[in-house]
Image: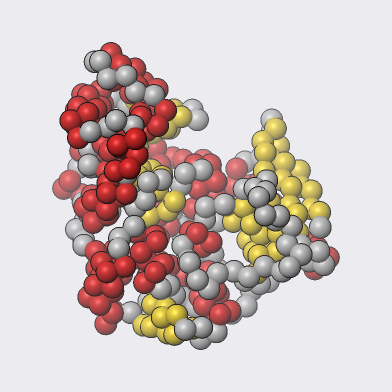
Amino acid sequence: MTRSDVLRRRLATQGLYGAGFATAADVVRLLACVQSQEYAHALWSLGMRSSGLKAADVQVAFDRGDFFRTHILRPTWHFVAAEDIRWILQVTAPRVQRLNQTIYRQEGLDQATLDRGAAITVEELQGGRYRTRAELAQGLADRGLASQRVHLAYIVMNAELEGLICSGPMRGAQQTYALLDERSPSSAAKTGDASELARRFFVGHGPASVQDLARWSSLTIGQCREAVAAVKDELDCATVEGVELWFDPDGPTAEPSAVALLLPLYDEITLSYRMINFPQPDCHPHQPGEDLFIGCVIIAETKVGLWRRTFEGRKVIMEVTLAEGVRARSEPLVEAVAAELATFVGKELELTITG
């Protein structure tokens, strides 16, 4: 297996090459957890792995509770399927809570304060009452626990990590919160442990390394090695450039593909791998210290450019900057995928390609 083989197989594994998935929840289940700190762009991460879905369809599935947006693997947002949230929290939340201890101390959030904040939050949400973060802040303040900004964020995150609350339906552009017991009864939950999390990671992200698993899951290298050892008979392993990579032997493969991908900044395909990632030419438009675009352009398993989008009325205005010498052969591919993105968000496309 070569570097190119690894990159193509990852793209196929993650549903970016080949037929797409029928539902957004199917994509989330495949990937186990999907980083989603930029909510609108995370919807596109799901949409580009699906077959014919639009953003409105993904939104309906989210509002219905097919999958949630919560803190579960790392101290940032992730999508996770309703049936998976409980057991993945049991595996990963203790580690994330340890990672949060520094912020807790800095914010004066001792255990008694966190417990009180969690109890008040539960009271605010009982009976199917969905609350925005601002409304939770007011509820906390009304009970003598003033919380704003980072202080508030970590009180809410603690309640998420303790398995008490999760996301509710969107209210306009704002996320609401709900009680996990009301949103996803425990009777519908699956079970699993660290070894199952490892198996799910490699099935949805392989070929990948133990170090990739550790970065993705927040578990220690030792925990990840033990988990892989428990499921190695269900996986294949290849050594590429001195790195052991694990993957599902029955997973999809792909031939070289002449398509362009417009990947969001925090997409799983670029975020999940510490080693053996997509190369980029020396003339790539990204300059050190600049972060002007929300995502990257991938063609032939190579980062060839950057892109961003803005909404203006009925239009989605897209700006794509390609590396020098790439535009002539790549422009039709970029135009095609930009049109797909515009259809996904339900807007008229205004596209500018430079490079």
Measuring 55% from the left and 46% from the top, which residue is drawn there? 41
Q: Which image quadrant is residue 215 in?
A: bottom left
Give the position of the C terminus as an image quadrant. bottom right
142 vs 268, nearest the viewer: 142
Residue 293 as seen in the image, left or right of residue 57 = right
Horizontal and vertical percent position of residue 163: 23, 42
Horizontal and vertical percent position of residue 129: 28, 24
61 vs 95, nearest the viewer: 95
The correct choice, above or below, for 223 with respect to 95 in the image is below
Horizontal and vertical percent position of residue 144: 25, 15
Q: Which image quadrant is residue 348 in?
A: top right
Residue 277 as seen in the image, left or right of residue 76 = right
Residue 252 as seen in the image, left or right of residue 347 = left
Measuring 63% from the left and 70% from the top, which residue is drawn there? 279
Q: How is the image coloured?
A: secondary structure
Measuring 19% from the left and 27% from the top, which residue is drawn there? 116
Horizontal and vertical percent position of residue 234: 29, 79
Residue 293 in view of the camera: no
The correct choice, above or below, for 164 with respect to 228 in the image is above
Residue 157 as seen in the image, left or right of residue 54 = left
The correct choice, above or below, for 213 with respect to 291 in the image is below
Residue 149 in view of the camera: yes
